[in-house]
Amino acid sequence: MMAQSRASSIEEIAAFALSEGKNLGCSDVSVTAWKSNDSQVRFSNNTITLVNNVRNIALEVYISKDKKKIVGATYNPTEEGIKRFVQNLLSSCNALPPSEDYAPLPEGPFHYHGEANFDPRVTDAPLVDFVKQTIDSGLNAGAKRVSGSLNTRTIEQFILTTGGASGRDKQTKMLLNVRAFAEDNASGHGLSCTSYLSDFEPANAGYTAGDYAKRSLNPKMIPEGRYSVVFTPTVVANILPVASNASAFAIESGTSFLVDKLEQRIAVQTFKLEDHGVYPHGLGGAVFDAEGTPTGLTEIVGNGTFRSMLHNVTTAKKFGKKSTGNAGIIAPQPITIEFGSGDISLHDMIRETKDGVFITNNWYTRYQNYSNGEYSTVPRDAAFRIENGDLTEPLVGLRVSDSIPRQLNNIELISRERQWIEWWEVHIPTLAPAMMIRDVQLTRAVGS
Amino acid sequence: MDQAQRRGCEYAEARYQRTSGLSCLARNGVPEPAEMVEAEGIGVRLIYDGALAFGATNQTSNENVSDLVETIVRNAKVAASVIKDKIHFSIEDTHVEKWGTEEKKKVENVSVESVISLLKDVDKTIAKPISDVSFPNRMVFAGHDVEEKVYVNTDGSRLESRVPRVYFASILTALYEGKPTTASVPPGFSSLGGSGGWEIIEQLDLTNFVPKTATEITNGIKAKGKPPVSETLDVILGPNVAGLTSHESCGHPGEADRILGREGAQAGESFLKADSLGMEIGSSEAYVSDDPTIPHSMGFYLYDDEGVRARKRQLITAGKFTEFLQNRASAYYFGIKSNGSSRAVQFDREPIIRMGNTYIEPGDWTFEEMLKEVKRGVYIKSFMEWNIDDKRLNQRYVGLEAYMIENGTLKDTIKDPVFEITTPKYWGSIDARARDLEYTCGTCGKGDPMQGAPVFFGAPHIRLRNVRVGSR
């Protein structure tokens, strides 16, 4: 019997939901209960505009009966609420046809190694002080206005499944996204994304944004055409979504450029991409997936060749593989993405590029055709012309209009330094290098 | 609210919100696991000495809510000690009312079985090749949700609401001569539906609408003609494309929080300034409005999440910006009343300025009359890819179904015409609006944490003179 109040532990909540599902005759039940504490300070025009705190306890439940499957989440984790929710799930589940793709939950018990990246000091970190440091650094670097948000997250999760999976996980994150303006048309961007207080660098992120902003005054337009472009880790993490395209669900649905590409060369030989459950001393992660499978390391691309899709038990069964520990009940998904590093510094990359463009940030990436990866994205914040290996005039009004496969095969240089990225445009923690890609199509709007 | 006031807050509001929904997906006619979500809890926002703080929890015992309020007040006090600009809210009328959307077939009574049955029926209509184009990968989605709120504030407002919504969407892979192309019905990754009961979905007559639209799309899939690049010509945009432009290059830049810089690091700012009202942005034919009160629209509401009554806003009138979207904080800055634009999509999100249903006002032309006057041009009926910079000046829409126009007649289809244009050039080039206003549904992304808000995009056919298109 679970406590009647809403203060029940996530273990009690998961156990109660699991027993409800079993008592109702479900053959498969997976319950992940979580307790989260999110804090945020938003700021703009050098001042704080909102302080925010959200605390939730909720659960996700997957059930299957007679090979019929349904999944749901509820924020009502009382005994009565869970009973009603699981009953509703089952009654909807009974109305579904049996799934042709049914695969049972993986059989445990499993041993989960440790926990995701966690630092107990993050929960009570002095966010307002950090925001003041960020703003001051941006202004000291030459900006007139600094805006952004600092978010911290502490989440504990507990999973129980009818397959015998039982485990606890917890993680923390500190995500600072800062944008500085020297003038309306001269802005820079900085990030500090980490799970550990000791690695958090608000002053550095603020300074980076402010410095880029100051150097972006009086930007110019350049003609449309193909250029060698140096992209920062922030942009690389967004415009090369190879890991999400490697989801077996996306491939099976035709919404990936990787259809029929397994074991084929899809990129230059120096390109390497992996997915981790937990990257040691990295950003976030998870020790188990939504089906209870222990997460691990999956080589998605090695030596430029597409090595593995990401699987849950359903897609694994279809493709004759084992789960890679990337469930999503419906669709497998990456957990922590690592791009392989190169052997050149960013400074030398720009020097070797000689003639090209440097793009520091982007947003609004949209696809014309998922099948061939044709997309465009809009650079935002600082961008510079590269001439004779030096950054010269700041640029404005650009758009990147290219395709993922073409870019993967045009990567010329990969940086040694990598940076953790997670922000508005990059939702999955990603360790990314800078890259120089040749023959990138840049366009601009008419009427400028 | 009482506790916040006892702690010295000048303003407080509380919103209990419950959002429950069902979404279903069929791939190639085979149902995937359905998804049910119930999100409920309380969100509290307050102002202490000019500092704004928000907090939320689904742990709604008296003890937990009291503890949450103490935390929010404490956070606000810390912020108040360092903020440079104090936040004030405009003074607004108070309201005590229950409101909602009429629904004939309550969505709670719509079984997962009937939703799946509809999706399978729709899938069958496009499972066989249409006009030499096959659709080997078909994902069709449908679902519903109900948003229920009880809102109170220290001004004395108390509002209770219930808004059910229903939707249909699809993502298709079309195959023609061995080449796969992504498409959707409706095009542009948008959706169909609205606020109300399941009768809205039934009225869409999807088993006829989807194959009809898919048939039209095949014209774009099979197109081999190249867009006429580097040429000044006229462009007619279909409602599918023009509707999105009203949202992207008028509604967003007209959001007062962006204009004042509050979204600087996320959704961005605006090319408009606080003193831009009255600024000429377009031709005398440019008229754009936002109206959340349209019955059964996707962005329907009668009161916003600050207790302000919603009304129609005329954003661009005869080429001039005439109104911004305001919440109570921005309205105070401008010295005006809020026009009720503040919305939160879930209990644990702060209310921020959002569009409701943004659209280009219809004119008095017919499509045929517009077409007849074009000597050389391009008709972009629908699109897939689009984006715009974060100040909303530099936008792009890539056509899905598009045609050359010569001497007033539609000619060959063209492949992927790229319409990439600045906002002043866009609104300044419109010379005709048709009567045939159409809406599609979308999810507008803004805020941090991200809040996807349900909206309508609307427009009739419009004609632009002396512009250019490009190619991929």
Image (tube, coloured by chain):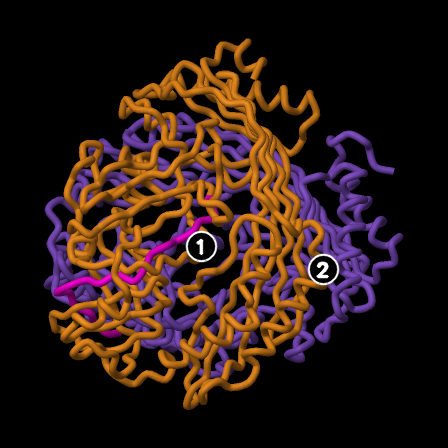
Chain colours: A purple, B orange
Residue B460 versus residue B40 in the image, above or below: below
Q: Quadrant of the N terminus of chain B?
A: top right
Secondary structure type for disc 2: strand
Please indicate whether residue B219 sits to the left or right of residue A281 in the image.
Answer: left
Residue B266: where, in percent of width, then height? Answer: 36, 43
Q: Chain of mark 2?
A: A
**For mark 1, does the 10 Å Cα neighbourhood hold few (<14), some (14 to 19), or many (20 or more) residues?**
many
Q: Is residue A205 visible?
A: no
Kind of residue sitting beneath label 2: Ile
Q: Is residue B281 visible?
A: yes
Kind of residue sitting beneath label 1: Gly
The residue that appears at 39% across and 63% down in the rendered structure is: A341
Tell us which disc is closer to us: 1 or 2: 1
Question: In this orientation, which residue lies closer to the viewer: A255 or B217?
Answer: B217
Question: In this orientation, which residue lies closer to the viewer: A115 or A48?
Answer: A48
Residue A242: where, in percent of width, then height? Answer: 45, 68
Q: Chain of mark 1?
A: B
Please indicate whether residue A276 sits to the left or right of residue B446 in the image.
Answer: right
- What range is drawn magenta here? B450-472
Q: CA distance from mark 1 to mark 2?
A: 26 Å
Residue B442, numbered label: 1
Magenta run includes residue A311: no
Please indicate whether residue B229 sits to the left or right of residue A412 in the image.
Answer: left
Residue B143: where, in percent of width, then height? Answer: 60, 57
Instruction: Tell me which secondary structure the magenta stretch mostly adopts.
Output: strand
Residue highlighted by disc 2 = A70
The residue that appears at 58% across and 14% down in the rendered structure is: B3
The residue that appears at 34% across and 62% down in the rendered structure is: B239
Question: In this orientation, which residue lies closer to the viewer: A217 or A325?
Answer: A217
